[in-house]
Amino acid sequence: GQNIDQPTEMTATEGAIVQINCTYQTSGFNGLFWYQQHAGEAPTFLSYNVLDGLEEKGRFSSFLSRSKGYSYLLLKELQMKDSASYLCAVKDSNYQLIWGAGTKLIIKP
Amino acid sequence: DADVTQTPRNRITKTGKRIMLECSQTKGHDRMYWYRQDPGLGLRLIYYSFDVKDINKGEISDGYSVSRQAQAKFSLSLESAIPNQTALYFCATSDSRETGELFFGEGSRLTVL
C-alpha cells in the first residue's frame, strides 16, 4: 500500500528553527508538495520538489531525497503565525496525490 | 473574492436528508476535486474531474455523487446523509499544464445528526 508518514505534533519556540520530516512509500513518484493549513482553513501551497535537493523560499525551505523516500520542510525565524498544520503530499505514478495526516506545529513565545 | 468558492460554508442536517455542496472557480482550471478531512486523518479524495465530461471515483466515493455542470462548477451530493459523513469538505482545482498544485476552496463544514 501507499503510505506517507509525518510526526503528529511538534513544538518549537518563536525565533527558532524547526524541521518537519516526511517519509513516503508510494507506487511511483512524480513530485512532492508541502502545504500549510491553519485550523479550520483551507490548505495553502508552500513548496514543490521533483528533483533531489533543497528548494529555498524565504523563511521556508524544502528538501527531497528520492532514493530515501524522504523530505523535510525547514522553517526558520519562527513566528507565532507559523502555528499551523503542515501537510506532505506525494504525486504517485498515476499522478494522484497521496496525503500525509499532517504535522501540527505549536509555536511558544 | 476567493478564486475557488464553496457553498454552503456550514450546514447542519439530519440523517437521511439529501445534501448538495457546490463549488465554483474563476481560475480557469480544467481539473476539479472533492476531498473530505477528518481530525487525525489526511485529506481523502472523494471524486475528481479532469474535464467537463470526465468523472472519476476517488478512494472514498461510496455514499457520494458529483456533477460537473461546466468547467467552472463541480458539485458534490450526499443522497442520504449519515452521521459518519460529518466532516470538513474541500473543493480544489488544478491546471493540467502545471505542476499539479491544488488550489483549495475555503471548506464546507457538514454536520449530520
Image (cartoon, coloured by chain):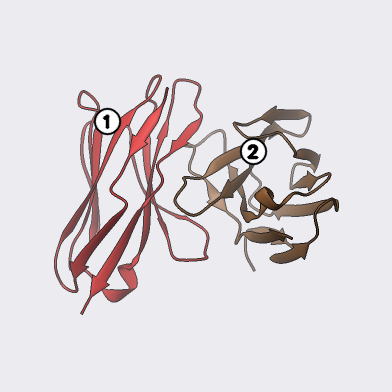
Chain colours: A red, B brown
What element does badge 2 sit on? strand
Position of residue A68 measured from the top left corner of the image (x, y, whole percent): 20, 27
Residue visible at 19% across and 74% down?
A14
Q: Is residue A27 above or below residue B38?
A: above
Residue A9 lies, in percent from the top left, at: 29, 57
Determine which of the numbered discs, if any, sits on residue A70 in the image: none
Asked if disc 2 and disc 1 are in contact, CB closer than 8 Å, the reply is: no
Horizontally, is B82 left or right of B102 in the view? right
Kindly indicate the quadrant of the structure image that contains residue B9. bottom right
Q: Identify residue type, mark 1.
A: Leu
Kindly report the distance in space between the C-alpha atoms of the residues bearing marks 2 and 1: 29 Å
Instruction: Answer few, some or many: residues within 10 Å of disc 2's Cα (few below 14, many 20 plus, some between 14 and 19).
Output: many
What residue does disc 2 label?
B46
Tag 1 subunit: A
- At label 2, the amino acid type is Ile
Mark 1: which secondary structure? loop
Q: Nearer the viewer, residue B104 or A108?
A: A108
- Nearer to us in this view, B50 or A19: A19
Kindly identify which numbered label has been placed on residue A51: 1
Say which residue appears at 66% left-offset and 60% top-offset. Answer: B108
